Amino acid sequence: MGYVIFVKLFAFAREVVGKDLVKVKIEGDTTVGDVLKDLRADFPQLNGILFDKNGNLRPDYSVFVNEKRLEKRQFYKYHLHSGDTILIYPPVGGGC
């Protein structure tokens, strides 16, 4: 039986996709890595923005599920549940 999770995009990724919240229907035992792989396939315009030439999420982006930050090594270990939200934050810079 399938369920729904969400992917929240920010900044330029949001502009390129045309919306800030992507609804994703998933089946069974799905990980964050699985969703990122599908996101890349569904929105090829994110290549070069969120994803590098090898299809990996660029290292300057941060990924959270709900309020928990994930390291890259956790992407295929963290299993999603109905209603979860993956947040993909762009790099933050600043200064004066």
Image: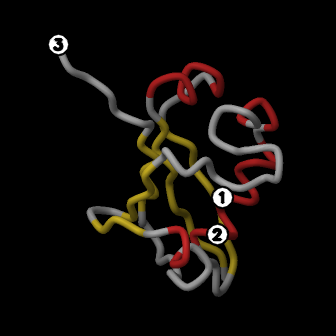
Q: CA distance from mark 3 to mark 1?
A: 34 Å
- Under circle 1, the secondary element is helix
User: x%, y% of residue 15?
Assistant: 56, 19
Q: Is 96 left or right of 63, judged from the image as shown?
A: left
- Mark toward the start of the polypeptide (3 vs 1): 1
Quarter of the picture containing the N terminus is: bottom right
Q: CA distance from mark 2 to mark 3?
A: 36 Å
- Under circle 3, the secondary element is loop
Q: How many residues crowd around disc 3 within 10 Å: few (fewer than 14), some, or many (20 or more)?
A: few
Which amino acid lies under the numbered mark 2 shown in the image of this protein? Gly
Query: Who's the residue at 74% across and 60% down the image?
Result: 37
Q: How many residues crowd around disc 2 within 10 Å: few (fewer than 14), some, or many (20 or more)?
A: some
Mark 3 vs mark 1: in front: 3
Label of residue 33 in the image: 2
- Mark toward the start of the polypeptide (2 vs 3): 2
Q: Is 83 left or right of 33, judged from the image as shown?
A: left
Mark 3 sits on what residue?
Answer: 96
- Under circle 2, the secondary element is helix
Q: Quadrant of residue 35?
A: bottom right
Which amino acid lies under the numbered mark 1 shown in the image of this protein? Leu
User: x%, y% of residue 2?
Assistant: 65, 75
- Placement of 15 over or under 47, stated as above or below: above
Colouring:
secondary structure
Label of residue 36 in the image: 1
Q: How many residues crowd around disc 1 within 10 Å: few (fewer than 14), some, or many (20 or more)?
A: many
Which amino acid lies under the numbered mark 3 shown in the image of this protein? Cys
User: x%, y% of residue 39?
Assistant: 70, 50
